[in-house]
């Protein structure tokens, strides 16, 4: 990325100290959880983050921004507040319940979650449209070619997409729609993708 990215502008509620404490009233708590979901989705879309740790630390961004420069979304150093671990888990559970996140590995939740600021269907349609527009349907493509190749016209929306996330899009959407095939090599690894 040639230009330095500007800082994400959090909404005012992010600076409201009680926002970081789980509220006892169910109605208020649901509004609070919805606000957290909204902030997380906007933050992740802004920095093009596709996965977060359970602690709210970015795991992958499509932007060439050092992830170490992005702290946990659950910590606000300006007002010296942070969400405790139990409330973090509740927020993540709410994200998942609203189909805005999914565990990277449900058997190992500590690996974090994929964040769906764009749905899997939309990601899959974007990938399919790119392959169709470039006349590559039926061609075997590598995961690298679909996300990182500088020699192709990979759209900005797909460029530098997390490879495990791309495979998830292909497996959980395109293959189920009959629009893709994964080709497995002799080492039982993905050798290529064919969009049909």
Image (cartoon, rainbow, N blue to C red):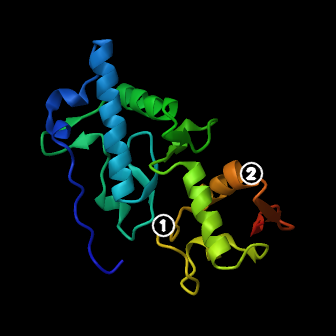
Q: Nearer the viewer, residue 69 or 100?
A: 100
Q: Nearer the viewer, residue 61 or 181?
A: 181
Give the image location of residue 44, x and y in percent.
38, 52
Q: Quadrant of residue 94?
A: top left
Q: Please name the residue that numbered disc 2 is placed on.
A: 177
- Return the mark for residue 166: none
The residue lying furthest to the right in this view is 186
Q: Residue at x 70, y 73 (%)?
A: 142
Taking depth in this image into account, of 30 and 135 the one nearest to the observer is 135
Residue depicted at x 37% and y 37%: 37
Residue 88, by quadrant, is top left
Residue 22 pos. (x, y %): 29, 22
- Single out the mark in the foreground, 1 or 2: 2
Please report whichever mark, 1 or 2, sits nearer to the chain's N-terminal start: 1
- Near mark 2 (Cα within 10 A), the count class, few <14, some 14-19 or many ≥20, is few
**CA–CA distance in space, label 1 to label 2:** 21 Å
For the residue labelled by badge 1, is the local secondary structure a helix, a strand or a loop? loop
Q: Name the quadrant of the C terminus.
A: bottom right
Q: Residue furthest top?
A: 25
């Amino acid at each position: 990325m040639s230009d330095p990215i500007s800082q994400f502008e959090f909404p005012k509620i992010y600076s409201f100290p009680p926002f970081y404490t789980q509220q006892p009233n169910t109605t208020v708590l649901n509004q609070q959880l919805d606000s957290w979901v909204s902030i997380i989705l906007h933050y992740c879309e802004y920095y093009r983050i596709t996965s977060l740790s359970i602690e709210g630390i970015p795991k992958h961004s499509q932007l060439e921004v050092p992830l170490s420069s992005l702290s946990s979304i659950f910590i606000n150093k300006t007002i010296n507040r942070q969400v405790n671990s139990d409330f973090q888990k509740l927020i993540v559970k709410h994200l998942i319940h609203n189909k805005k996140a999914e565990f990277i590995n449900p058997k190992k939740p500590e690996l974090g979650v994929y964040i769906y600021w764009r749905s899997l269907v939309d990601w899959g349609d974007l990938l399919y449209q790119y392959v169709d527009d470039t006349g590559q349907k039926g061609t075997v493509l590598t995961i690298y070619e679909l996300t990182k190749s500088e020699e192709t016209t990979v759209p900005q929306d797909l460029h530098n997409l997390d490879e495990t996330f791309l495979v998830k899009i292909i497996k959980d959407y395109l293959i189920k729609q009959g629009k893709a095939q994964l080709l497995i090599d002799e080492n039982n690894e993905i050798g290529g993708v064919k969009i049909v």
